[in-house]
Image (tube, rainbow, N blue to C red):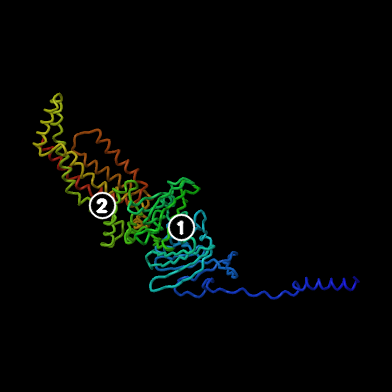
Amino acid sequence: MDRRTVLALVLVAAVILLTPKLFAPPRAPLPTDSTALVDSAPRPTMDTAATPATVAPVAVASRDTVVRIPAETLHVADSNSSLAFANTGGALQSVELKQYKSLAPGDGPVVLEGRGQPLLSFRGIVGRDTIAFDTARFRVTRNQSSGSTSQIAFEGVVGSDTLALNYAIDPDSFLVHIDGQVRGPLAQQGFILMDYAPTLGSYEADSIDDQRHLGFAYEVANRGSKGTAFGKLDPGEQVLVPGPLTWVALKNKYFILGVLARDSVSPMAEIRMTGLARTSRTATLAQGTTVIQPRQGSFALDVYAGPQQSTRLQALGRDFENSNPYGGFMQPVVQPFAGLVLKVLLWMRHTFNIGYGWVLVIFGVAVRLILWPLNQTAMRTSMKMQRIQPELQALQTRYKADPQKLQSEMMRVYKEHNMSPFSMFSGCLPLLLPMPVLFALFFVFQSTIEFRGVPFMWLADISQKDPFYILPLVMGVSMFVLSWIGSRNTPPNPQTKMMLYLFPVMMTFLLANLASGLNLYYAVQNLAALPQQWLISSERAKAAVKKA
């Protein structure tokens, strides 16, 4: 082969190899699928426009289409709240409560938020495989208002599974309706995992006390409501509560995020609560996950994100008012009575149109006036018992060797004075009647939002302790004076004298760091009881003069 032939072959090979590199054809544009794009048109129904963030490096892909969906947050606002939704996971991100101001240092409203985590987010599970909807970019399929209800709908695809979430927001009610649909294998043999935020931010003056109230509340259908405080969950400890569940809630002292089954047949099959690492003595983190069982590929839930206001909780039905229980382990006894006391206070507040401080003053006086006849009877019974005590003691000395004779003689003495052996207890019972009211108010002041931030005279907040300890001192002094007047003209008794000094001091120290409204009520009760105690003491003195 001569040189010219070799050179020709080399040139032909060079042309074949280099031509595609040097003269590459122009790249065809990617086809655009309009249904996979986030709607960026103006939305007059939204009070705040969607806020796009940095475009995510991941993409939603089909066989020949790649569409990048940017992360964005959408807001819906009314006069009460502003809700933020994220298209990452189609999650409810946060809820700003406009009418409730932060009592912590700094200005601004209370915001239900989970320290960077969504309030509610969703995942899927099929067998042992978890479907990470919570990190997938969802497309917005609806963003509109129909009548008075605003709606936002998301749809996300992970592999062969699809999750569609439609949020319908009721105005001025802190209520959101969720209608979910799933498609793919998840609809046939899977479950939805609904994750709660690991905490709720504190906006209270006493943040530690607020954090102590962090916990979950839930009601198992036909088995009553229960609660699990964060502090009851050790790090790593897991508590599983099987359902069906009527509702599940995450709460702190005054605010709550509750998810309620809309239908009588609840889709919430169980809740799993897990303790997380603690950064202080107070447990502030825990993970709650509710397992949802779709029926025919769909589920329906109602979400309440707002204040633990008794009237609103009761209006939701489904025993949701029990999500804010009173009395702890004594709830079955305390809850009805505390609820009754709270209803009376709310009725007085709205009927007389006065502040809660004056409501407590009037309530304290009213309780004493209502109990006046019972107390009068009790005090006079006590006076009779004191008069016959010497006679009873003499009988005990005379017939100590004959119990039957002693009993018959004592019954004769009781009958002569129109009394019975039980008169001692019946006389003491009315004196103890104010105590259940005080006990109920103790629990009411612990977590009743109606008293939050309410000022009265020098008090900035009647739900917090008196910063100057004026009311606890007034309460203690009034209790001492009440006991001192009650002990006048009575036979000397060392035990009574000891209690005269010890009990007021003990109660002062016990109530000093509790709600100032509680001290206000107790102090007013003591002051209102002074005239009656003085009258009984004078009556006792006159009886002693006549006997002499």
Q: Nearer the viewer, residue 328 or 19?
A: 19
Helix, strand or loop at label 2? It is: helix
**x, y percentage for residue 303?**
40, 61
Q: Residue at x 27, y 53 (%)?
A: 341
- The disc placed on residue 313 is none
Q: Nearer the viewer, residue 423 or 155?
A: 155
Q: Which residue is mark 1?
A: 191
Mark 1 or mark 2: which comes first in sequence? 1
Q: Residue furthest top?
A: 401
Q: Residues within 10 Å of mark 2 (few under 14, many from 20)?
A: many
Quarter of the image with the C terminus is top left
- Quadrant in the rendering for residue 145: bottom left
Closer mark to the observer between disc 1 and disc 2: 1
Q: Nearer the viewer, residue 541 or 140?
A: 140
**x, y percentage for residue 507?**
31, 43
Quarter of the image with the N terminus is bottom right
Q: Which residue is mark 2?
A: 364
Q: Residue furthest right?
A: 2
Amino acid tagged 1: Phe
Q: Residues within 10 Å of mark 1 (few under 14, many from 20)?
A: many
* Location of residue 491 with respect to 95 vertically, above or below: above
* Distance in Å between CA atoms under marks 1 and 2: 54 Å
Q: Residue furthest left?
A: 416
Could you tell me if residue 462 is visible in this image?
A: no
Could you tell me if residue 488 is visible in this image?
A: yes
User: In the figure, is residue 360 to the left or right of 398?
Assistant: right
